[in-house]
Image (cartoon, grey):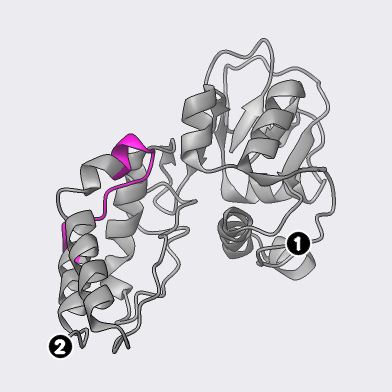
Amino acid sequence: PIYNLPGVSQGLKFSGPLLADIVLGKVRKWNDPAIAKHNPGVSLPGTDITFVHRSDGSGTTFVWADYLAKVSPEFKQKVGADASLNWPVGVGGKGNEGVTGMVRQTPGSIGYVELIYALQNKIAVGAVQNSAGTYVAPSVESVTAAAAGASADMPDDFRVSITDAPGAEAYPIASFTWLLLYEDPRDKAQGRVMADFLRWALGEGQVHARELGYAPLPQEIVERELAALDRLKLQ
């Protein structure tokens, strides 16, 4: 989560159930005991909380809601997990840019965006307590750790959620980004070019992912994806 809380210089900590209660409108002020419990020694103001969500359908919303639905039965029942939702409280911003802008302009606000938008705009980000009980801040390293934690349960088609992944260093609100490829493409030459690009992206190209705020894939997943590329019918 990103937030805007003037006068608070320390990085704030949250749990998944706490974030769900904020989104459900059950925690309405920043000095609520539920927030103070995770932030001992931090002087929290009695400012009203404004939740900023996406107004458009998005994968970012799905990842956020998928996590909250896992850690809060009430959120799962009342809101659910989808790319577009009817939020109980809050205001909407269009795109990651819109949410980022509204949080920057609204004291007391909290919202969710892709990591790169928080980094580029130098907005405060909260650490979230993961399934191992550790408070972990979002970073390319902690997202890679989440992917590694989920790799043992990775199906052959790679369709897996890595929110609330196991591992002491895993950031719990994380996701893969997928590409859909034809296993037997009609245009073989085009398919070979795509496969060559993906082999580069899974290898030396990963350094550029880090530069853009995206997490490099763990080696065990890279190896499985390279094997999947080898199964494409490109001749």
Identity, as a three-letter code, of the amino acid under mark 1: Leu
Q: In the displayed structure, does residue 200 sit left or right of residue 136?
A: left
- Left or right, residue 20 beside residue 163: right
N-terminal label among 1 and 2 = 1
Q: Quadrant of the N terminus?
A: top right
Q: Quadrant of the C terminus?
A: bottom left
**Residue beneath disc 1:** 85
Q: Residue at x 26, y 68 (%)?
A: 194
Mark 1 falls on what kind of element? Answer: loop
Q: CA distance from mark 1 to mark 2?
A: 44 Å
> Magenta stretch?
209-220
Closest to the observer, 102 or 218: 102
On the image, the x and y values in percent for residue 228 come to: 21, 78
Decide whether residue 212 is among the magenta residues: yes
Q: Is residue 27 visible?
A: yes
Please state which of residues 110 and 11 is positioned toward the viewer in this rendering. 110
What residue is disc 2 on?
Answer: 235
In the image, residue 104 sits, relative to residue 22, either above or below, namely above
Residue 72, percent across and down? Answer: 65, 60
Front residue of 33/29: it is 29
In percent of the image, x 30 and y 39: which residue is there? 210
User: Mark 1 or mark 2, which is nearer to you?
Assistant: 2
Q: Can residue 37 be seen by looking at this rendering?
A: no
- Report the number of discs: 2
